[in-house]
Image: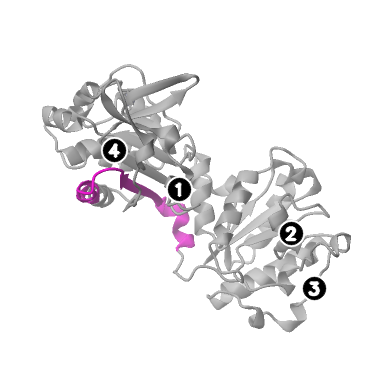
Amino acid sequence: MKQVFLSYARADGKKVKRLYDDLSRMGSIRVWFDRVDLLPGVKWNPAIRKAIRESDFFLAVLSQQSVSNRGFRHSELREALDVSKEFPEDWIFLVPTRLDDCPMPFHELEELNYADLFPKWDDGVARLCSTLQTSASSGKPLVRDEIPHDDLSIMVDVDRVGKSERTSIDGGKVLRRRKEPRRAHTVRRTYHYKVGLADLDLKSGIRTMGRVAHGLDSVQSSFHFTLERLSAPRKALTTMDRCPQLYLPRLPKSFYKRVGPLDTDNVICLTRRFLAFDEGSYVRYNHLTGDSPAEPRVRFISYAGLQEHAEAAGVTLEVAIAYLITAELVDYFLDLGYHDQTRNCPMDRTEDHSELTGGLRAGHFCKSCARALDKGTPFASAFRAMIAWGR
Ligand SMILES: [Zn+2]
């Protein structure tokens, strides 16, 4: 079943609920609507990115009120625009959908086919439905020739003649999307997030990462682990306090380019070097975990000296790496955070690796983290299985 993602501003909530109801009544299309589909306890950002990635159409609902509002979901729209650039020019993914005669918030949107739900709501919805339905019922992407000829209409925005001609969605380009089969109808039940794992500086580390990815995949189905090819450029490496460090702010844009706009929900990079990053005017160094200052999806883990502590805890290096990865995912996907006290738990905020040994040996969450995990999140059993993996 084709999926439509509804992007809108709070100010338009009522009308968007009505659009959701109207589109859902079609039966042949699944509509992703945050008020219905966002699960409690799940961070909205990765959940929304995942939903956009799995959708066949992205309806950007716009109105005069919402485009002038600073709270408008510009980041969602930006992502959708990035995704649409991955497709051939005649494929349609992003459909600006106007509730009134509002301007487009981005210049790029002006070049796209759009749908108007005014002046007559029912007519607008019917036109939109017929276009989406043609694509949904054929089970394949909609191409222009397949659109019933009566539906073809060209609308030119008189205010902008000479600047750019805009066509309505049903009179415009071809509606097509990725070729691979979609599994949108299973979204509600499987919570399948894609996590990329990369070893930044060891070629032999790829085998280790492969075993970790395979192992973590085998014990749960909430996250799917893939291997990413990312390497840290020389200029990001430095030495502080006589220890080699990966200085995160020095990673260039080209480093993040391999992390596609929506390809992975999260990427975890491992390095044998310690991590250094800026905090205010200070440079923090010798750290074991760190967030990217440039891309929130990218996290870093250092395994400097980890082997020793894995041995002390009686586990393999792979198990210790999986343990650190799990803690990072808990921190990223849920608003759980690390705790300052040492409780022999993956969520201990470890200043050095020696504090990891107790938690590695225990192989489970502390009581307070376990309680927080059980509070209605869909991931509790997955995270438990991941930190128990390989023991
Ligand atoms: Zn804990």
Mark found first going from the N terminus, 3 or 1 = 3
What's the amino acid at mark 4? Thr
What's the amino acid at mark 1? Ser
Q: Nearer the viewer, residue 184 or 228?
A: 228
Task: Tell me: 30 left or right of 239.
Answer: right
Circle 3: is it few (<14), some (14-19), or many (20+) Cα within 10 Å?
some
Q: Position of residue 13 (x, y in %)?
A: 70, 45
Q: Nearer the viewer, mark 4 or mark 3?
A: 4
- The magenta-colored residue range is 183-211
Residue at 36% of width from left, 21% of height from top?
Answer: 339
In whole angstroms, how far apart are the C-alphas of marks 4 and 3? 55 Å
In whole angstroms, how far apart are the C-alphas of marks 3 and 1? 41 Å
Q: CB of residue at label 3: within 8 Å of ligand 1? A: no
Q: Are marks 3 and 1 in contact (CB under 8 Å)?
A: no
Circle 2: is it few (<14), some (14-19), or many (20+) Cα within 10 Å?
some
In this figure, which residue is indicated by the disc labeled 3?
154
Label annotation for residue 254: 1
In whole angstroms, how far apart are the C-alphas of marks 1 and 2? 29 Å
**Secondary structure of residue under mark 3:** loop
Q: Nearer the viewer, mark 4 or mark 1?
A: 1
Mark found first going from the N terminus, 1 or 2 = 2
Q: Position of residue 66 (x, y in %)?
A: 75, 44
Residue at 33% of width from left, 26% of height from top?
Answer: 287
35 over 89 or under it: above or below: above
Label annotation for residue 97: none
Mark found first going from the N terminus, 2 or 3 = 2
What's the amino acid at mark 2? Glu
In whole angstroms, how far apart are the C-alphas of marks 2 and 4? 44 Å
**Secondary structure of residue under mark 4:** strand
Quadrant of the image occupied by residue 186 = bottom left
In this figure, which residue is indicated by the disc labeled 4?
271
